Image (cartoon, grey):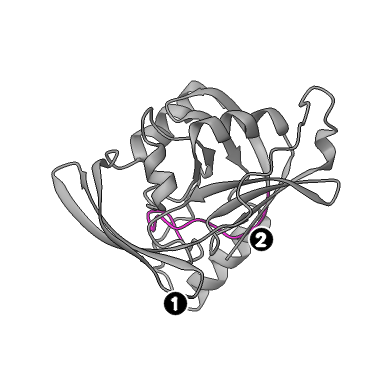
């Protein structure tokens, strides 16, 4: 990714949430944690109720040597309803990371500015090891499928005729000291997939330009 592209991505992000506090949390008995959090975002104080799945399989720490990994056999599966990013290698899940998304995680991206994370098949288009969010892997959104969906929405009047499709969607880490946002399930991005910094650093080594990524509900 060029420095110009990285600057554009960073300038589009809202101010980083700060001073996050958990006001209450409970198990709903259906495999989820109901968590009420409060944080500052710019001058605004945000209070938010989160429904976060209890992920039993997050982790998977089998030894993997990225230098000998056949990166053409790596597939990333992002599951927005489970708040996970899984690394599949030769049809076996070898890693499962906690992930967060835009503030409406179960909505598919419709247009620029809606802060939703797009769904479908993508590929890693570029990689930046020096992002303000530790590492950044740019996806090829919008691809042909995304453009077809966007045009259909516009034709059917579901988005404004003046809408633009957007771009600069990727997988990245978080600011230094921000891992709690991932742990608590706070969806703060403008549509990107965000991981803890130690996780994005590891994932970065497993991927290459062209790595396939499936994003689903």
Q: Position of residue 139 (x, y in %)?
A: 61, 43
Q: Position of residue 82 (x, y in %)?
A: 55, 61
Q: Position of residue 71 (x, y in %)?
A: 80, 34
- Asked which secondary structure carries label 2, the reply is helix
- Is-magenta flag for residue 172? no
Q: Which residues are magenta?
A: 111-122
Count of marks overlaid on the render: 2
Observer-nearest of 52 and 69: 52
49 versus 100 height, above or below: below
Residue labelled with disc 2: 145
**Gap between marks 2 and 1, in whole Å?**
19 Å
Dot 1: within a 10 Å radius of its alpha carbon, few (fewer than 14), some, or many (20 or more) residues?
few
Q: In the rendered view, does 180 fall on the left or right side of 196?
A: left
Whether residue 136 is visible, yes or no, is no
Label at residue 157: 1
Q: Position of residue 74 (x, y in %)?
A: 78, 42
């Amino acid at each position: 990714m060029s420095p110009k592209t990285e600057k554009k991505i960073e300038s589009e992000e809202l101010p980083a949430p700060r001073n996050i506090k958990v006001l209450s949390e409970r198990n709903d008995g259906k495999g989820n944690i109901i968590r009420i959090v409060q944080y500052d975002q710019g001058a605004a104080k945000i209070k938010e109720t989160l429904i976060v799945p209890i992920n039993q399989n997050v982790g998977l720490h089998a030894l993997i040597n990225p230098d000998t990994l056949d990166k053409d056999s790596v597939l990333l599966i992002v599951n927005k309803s489970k708040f996970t990013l899984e690394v599949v290698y030769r049809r076996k899940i070898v890693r499962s990371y906690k992930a967060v998304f835009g503030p409406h995680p179960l909505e598919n991206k419709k247009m620029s500015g809606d802060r939703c994370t797009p769904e479908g098949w993508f590929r890693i288009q570029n990689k930046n090891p020096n992002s303000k969010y530790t590492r950044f892997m740019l996806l090829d959104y919008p691809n042909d499928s995304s453009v077809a969906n966007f045009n259909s929405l516009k034709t059917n009047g579901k988005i404004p005729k003046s809408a633009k499709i957007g771009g600069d969607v990727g997988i990245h880490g978080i600011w230094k000291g921000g891992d709690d946002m991932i742990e608590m399930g706070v969806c703060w991005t403008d549509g990107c997939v965000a991981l803890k910094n130690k996780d994005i650093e590891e994932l970065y080594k497993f991927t290459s330009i062209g790595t396939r990524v499936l994003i689903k509900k």
